[in-house]
C-alpha cells in the first residue's frame, strides 16, 4: 500500500468515525452529556490522585507540602462530586454559563447604545445582545435542555464533517 492509499484509508476511517460520533450526539444528547460529565469527574479525580501521590513521593523536596496535598485531595473530591451528582453539576454549569451570557448581553446592549449615539450601525450588535439574553435565560430556565440542543448541533456538525471527509477522501485523485 503506497502513501496515497494509506492517506485515503485513514481519511475514510476518520470520516466514518465522525459520522458515527455525529449520529450518537444527535440521537442520544442526554447520554452524551452524562458521559461527558462522568468523564470530566473521572479525569479530575485521576489528576487529583496523581497530584496527591506525587506530593507524597516528593514530600521532602516540596516547599508547600500541605498545599500540594490539599489541591490533590480537593481535585479528587471534586471529581467524585461530579460523578455522583451529574444532574446538579450540569445545572450549576448552566447557571454559570447563563450568568456569563447575561453579562455578555448587557455588554452588547451597552455597545449598541454607544454605536447608536455615534450614528453607527448598531443593529447587528443589538441582535447579538438579544441572542445572548435569550441564551442566558434559557440556561437559567433549563440548562440540561439547552446543553442538549448544543450537543445536537455538535452532532449535526460532526455528521456533516464526516460526510465531507469521506467524500473528499474517496474522490481524491492520485497525481
Image: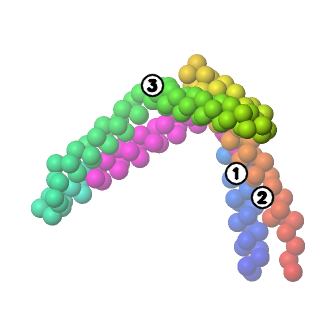
Secondary structure beneath label 3: helix
Magenta-span inclusion, residue 27: yes
160 or 92: nearer the eye? 92
Q: Residue at x 45, y 25 (%)?
A: 88
Residue topped by disc 3: 88
- The vertical placement of 93 against 24, above or below, is above
Question: Within 10 angstroms of label 1, few (less than 14), some, or many (20 or more) residues?
Answer: many
- The vertical placement of 63 against 48, above or below, is below
Q: Are circles 2 and 3 on residues that touch, CB within 8 Å?
A: no
The residue segment tinted magenta is 22-51
93 or 170: nearer the eye? 93
Q: Residue at x 76, y 52 (%)?
A: 161
- Closer mark to the observer between disc 3 and disc 1: 3
Magenta-span inclusion, residue 63: no
- The vertical placement of 55 against 71, above or below, is below
Q: Residue at x 15, y 64 (%)?
A: 61
Instruction: Kindly report the distance in space between the C-alpha atoms of the residues bearing marks 2 and 1.
Output: 9 Å
Residue topped by disc 2: 165
On the rendered structure, is 135 left or right of 84?
A: right
On the rendered structure, is 35 left or right of 85?
A: right
Q: Which corner quadrant of the image does residue 11 belong to?
A: bottom right
Residue 146 appears in the figure: no
Where is residue 58? Give x, y as percent.
18, 61
92 or 135: nearer the eye? 135
Amino acid at each position: 500500500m503506497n502513501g496515497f492509499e494509506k492517506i485515503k484509508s485513514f481519511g475514510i476511517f476518520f470520516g466514518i468515525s465522525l459520522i458515527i460520533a455525529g449520529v450518537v450526539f444527535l440521537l442520544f444528547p442526554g447520554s452524551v452529556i452524562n458521559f461527558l460529565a462522568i468523564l470530566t469527574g473521572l479525569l479530575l479525580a485521576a489528576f487529583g490522585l496523581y497530584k496527591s501521590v506525587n506530593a507524597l513521593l516528593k514530600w521532602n523536596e516540596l516547599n508547600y507540602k500541605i498545599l500540594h496535598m490539599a489541591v490533590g485531595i480537593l481535585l479528587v473530591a471534586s471529581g467524585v462530586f461530579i460523578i455522583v451528582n451529574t444532574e446538579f453539576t450540569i445545572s450549576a454549569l448552566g447557571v454559570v454559563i447563563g450568568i456569563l451570557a447575561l453579562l455578555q448581553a448587557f455588554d452588547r446592549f451597552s455597545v449598541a447604545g454607544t454605536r447608536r449615539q455615534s450614528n453607527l450601525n448598531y443593529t447587528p450588535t443589538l441582535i447579538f445582545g438579544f441572542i445572548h439574553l435569550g441564551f442566558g435565560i434559557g440556561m437559567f430556565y433549563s440548562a440540561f435542555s439547552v446543553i442538549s440542543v448544543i450537543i445536537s448541533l455538535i452532532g449535526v456538525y460532526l455528521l456533516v464533517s464526516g460526510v465531507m471527509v469521506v467524500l473528499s477522501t474517496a474522490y481524491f485523485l492520485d497525481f
